[in-house]
Amino acid sequence: MASIKTERLLLRPASINDVADLHDIFSNPDAMAFWSTPPHVSLAETEAWVATTMSIDPREGEDFVVECCGQVIGKVGLYQFPEIGFILNPNSWGRGYAREALTALIDRAFLVHRLPSIDADVDPRNEASLGLLQRLGFQVVGHALRTWNVEGVWCDSVYLRLMRPDSKVS
């Protein structure tokens, strides 16, 4: 899997050396507030997550660690084509990093992988992510109740889709 360089960021494949930095994110309740799993309790959980990310079949998806100034600040990816996902360390929120990383990822998904569309499943309480995706051109295509159970709490979903610019709408 190739790396992607943007103006301020490096999106690159995960390595086992990223476990501690990613654990800082995946154990953070604010970062994980709208994730489909509870915050990681142990480093072993994050290590297993990184191992899973590293083993993604490139024909089925790809996940990238996001670095800024040599520091891991999050992850973006299409864990399973065509669904997009992203998470950033809260100390890097509000600086445009998510938009910059997602724009590069979307470009790659359409140009390299030739995906006809990209989908997102977002908790409706996650207004920041919903707004960002809509600013990137994603359109709401559906809603569902009680789609994720995270530590005994049911969460709903808003489904969004971004069509490849040159794709035909049927």
Image: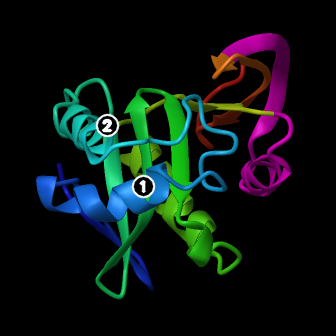
Q: Which of marks 2 and 1 is in front?
A: 2
Residue 137 inside the magenta-drawn segment: yes
Disc on res. 75: 1
Horizontal and vertical percent position of residue 163 = 65, 34
* Vertical position of residue 116 compared to residue 128: above or below: above
Give whichever of 143, 137 is nearer the camera. 143
Identify which amino acid the numbered label 1 is placed on.
Answer: Lys
Residue 128 inside the magenta-drawn segment: yes
Of mark 2 and mark 1, the one earlier in the sequence is: 2
Please tell me which residue is depicted at 48% across the width and 51% down the height of the picture.
27
Horizontal and vertical percent position of residue 59 = 23, 26
Asked if residue 30 lies left or right of residue 69, the reply is right
Secondary structure of residue under mark 1? strand
- Residue tagged by mark 2? 45
Image-quadrant location for residue 158: top right
Please tell me which residue is depicted at 52% across the width and 29% down the height of the picture.
83
Give whichever of 16, 106 is nearer the camera. 16
Q: Farthest residue in the bottom direction?
A: 69
Horizontal and vertical percent position of residue 62 = 31, 39
* Vertical position of residue 60 compared to residue 45: above or below: above
Give whichever of 155, 96 is nearer the camera. 155
Q: What stretch is highlighted in magenta?
A: 124-148
Image-quadrant location for residue 97: bottom right
Please tell me which residue is depicted at 13% across the width and 53% down the height of the picture.
16
Disc on res. 62: none
Quadrant of the frame with the C terminus = top right
* Vertical position of residue 150 compared to residue 90: above or below: above
In whole angstroms, how far apart are the C-alphas of marks 2 and 1?
Answer: 16 Å
Identify which amino acid the numbered label 2 is placed on.
Answer: Glu
Horizontal and vertical percent position of residue 67 = 35, 73
